[in-house]
Amino acid sequence: MTSTGKIVVGAVVVIILAAGAYYWFSRSSAGSAGSVPTSTASQNAASSSDTSDASMQQDLSSIDAQLGGLQSDNADVSNSLNAQ
């Protein structure tokens, strides 16, 4: 096989692999997009139109709660890794 033929075959293989990866990731991301509960997402979303002190305090409380959950998850992961 000539070098031009090898390049063409290689390009076709790369295109097929890229199309397969795109198909795979588009299917998996479409399935997980609907798994976020809407009540949590709307409750934790920062309000860009209301800039009152009460609204900002509510947003800060929401962020603190999320960071607390992150710290708890991080501790759980660290404990499970140390247990192995």
Image (tube, rainbow, N blue to C red):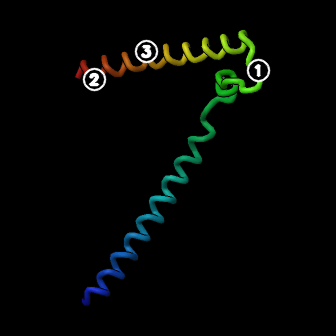
User: Residue 49 appears at what percent x and percent y?
Assistant: 76, 25
At label 1, counting other C-alpha atoms closer than 10 Å, the crowd grade (few under 14, some 14-19, many 20 or more) is: few
- Residue beneath disc 1: 50
Where is 45 relative to 54, above or below? below
Q: Mark 3 belongs to which amino acid?
A: Ser
Q: Amino acid at mark 1?
A: Asp
Residue 68's place in the image compared with 16, above or below, is above
Closer to the chain start, of discs 3 and 2, is: 3
Q: State the separation of the CA atoms marked 3 and 2.
A: 14 Å
Instruction: Determine the residue positioned at 34% across, 80% down.
Output: 9
How would you rate the neighbour count of disc 2 (Cα within 10 Å): few for under 14, some for 14-19, many for 20 or more?
Answer: few
- Image position of 23 (left or right of 33): left
Q: Quadrant of the C terminus?
A: top left
| SS assignment at label 3 | helix
Query: Residue 35 falls in which quadrant of the image?
Result: top right
Q: Quadrant of the N terminus?
A: bottom left
Looking at this rendering, what residue extends furthest in the bottom direction?
Answer: 2
Residue 28 x %, y %: 52, 48
| SS at mark 2 in the image | helix
Residue 36 in the image, given as x and y percentages of width and height:
61, 32
- Name the residue that disc number 2 marks: 81
Q: Nearer the viewer, mark 2 or mark 1?
A: 1
Residue assigned mark 3: 72
Query: Circles 3 and 2: CB distance less than 8 Å?
Result: no
Judge left or right: residue 26 versus residue 9: right
Q: Is residue 63 left or right of residue 43?
A: left
Q: Residues within 10 Å of mark 3 (few under 14, many from 20)?
A: few
Q: Residue at x 55, y 52 (%)?
A: 27
